[in-house]
Image (cartoon, rainbow, N blue to C red):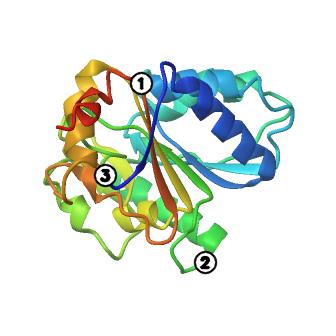
């Protein structure tokens, strides 16, 4: 297995603590969408009094307006940002409403403004894992998996619903992070976890391509999601 595994009944608890701790230290933190991260964000909001030192970035976004029900930003706003008004972090939103290509270019410019021309080394990156083993909006077999020059790209046709275009960080950016934590819950993700964390790198299981260059990779899962790993499958 290419990651440090932690299995707990309720991964949102330790994930919220990791997020609040990193935010308290400041620096740059990447957050993601999904139901499991949402629970962690809700709890993290109450664990830290002052979020103003941290810069929050997004792993990916759907190309919808920021108040749309499918927007990752809208979910983060409701679960975290609205709960910490007056002590808010810097927030770098992906502008999904601009479309996949213009939105990706705009976010790439924003990353360059913060980090210069080198690959950004985010201090913490919290990711989810899809049932098809995708991470960010990097889907199985998609050409975006092979991108090595750009830091952000548009994805015209996602590999699973909702079938709206996306904006996503690229693998080189993800793997340059100092700490990657993949948060996964549910029996429906067990096979994806097995494919991503039990075998060799495989473009058909993008999670298996998480190979930090100098940082750490951690899998934070509940027993159901980790069940096939525990069975040795």
> Considering the numbered disc 2 on the image, is that residue within a helix, a strand or a loop?
loop
Residue at numbered disc 1: 222
> Considering the numbered disc 3 on the image, is that residue within a helix, a strand or a loop?
loop
Closer to the camera in the image, 181 or 51: 181
> Considering the numbered disc 1 on the image, is that residue within a helix, a strand or a loop?
loop
Residue ID at (32%, 46%): 137
Query: Which numbered disc covers residue 1?
Result: 3
Q: Residues within 10 Å of mark 1 (few under 14, many from 20)?
A: many
Residue ID at (65%, 68%): 114
Closer to the camera in the image, 56 or 3: 3
Q: Is residue 105 above or below residue 1?
A: below
Sequence order check: which comes first, mark 2 or mark 3? Answer: 3
**Residue 173 visible, this orientation:** yes
In the visual, does 16 lie left or right of 183? Answer: right
Closer to the camera in the image, 190 or 60: 190
Sequence order check: which comes first, mark 2 or mark 1? Answer: 2
Where is residue 125? Give x, y as percent: 53, 50
Looking at the rendered image, the disc whose residue lies closer to the viewer, 2 or 3, is 3
Query: Which numbered disc covers residue 116?
Result: 2
Q: Residues within 10 Å of mark 2 (few under 14, many from 20)?
A: few
Residue ID at (37%, 23%): 223
**Looking at the rendering, in which quadrant would you find the C terminus?**
top left
Q: Are marks 2 and 1 in contact (CB under 8 Å)?
A: no
Looking at the rendered image, the disc whose residue lies closer to the viewer, 1 or 3, is 3
Q: CA distance from mark 2 to mark 3?
A: 34 Å
């Amino acid at each position: 297995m290419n990651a440090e595994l932690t299995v707990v009944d309720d991964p949102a608890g330790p994930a919220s603590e990791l997020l609040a701790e990193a935010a308290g230290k400041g620096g740059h933190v990447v957050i993601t969408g999904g139901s499991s991260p949402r629970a962690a964000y809700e709890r993290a909001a109450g664990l830290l009094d002052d979020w103003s030192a941290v810069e929050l970035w997004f792993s990916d976004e759907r190309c919808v307006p920021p108040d749309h029900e499918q927007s990752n930003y809208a979910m983060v706003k409701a679960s975290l940002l609205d709960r910490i008004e007056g002590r808010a972090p810097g927030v770098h939103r992906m502008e999904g409403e601009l479309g996949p290509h213009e939105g990706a270019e705009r976010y790439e410019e924003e990353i360059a403004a913060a980090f210069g021309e080198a690959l950004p080394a985010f201090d913490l990156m919290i990711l989810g894992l899809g049932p098809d083993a995708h991470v960010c909006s990097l889907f199985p077999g998609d050409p975006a998996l092979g991108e090595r020059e750009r830091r952000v790209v548009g994805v015209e046709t996602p590999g699973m619903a909702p079938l709206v275009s996306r904006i996503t960080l690229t693998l080189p950016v993800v793997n340059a992070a100092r700490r990657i934590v993949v948060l996964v819950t549910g029996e429906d993700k067990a096979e994806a976890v097995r494919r991503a964390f039990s075998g060799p790198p495989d473009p058909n299981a993008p999670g298996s391509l998480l190979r930090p260059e100098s940082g750490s990779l951690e899998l934070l899962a509940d027993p159901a999601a980790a069940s096939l790993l525990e069975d040795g499958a």
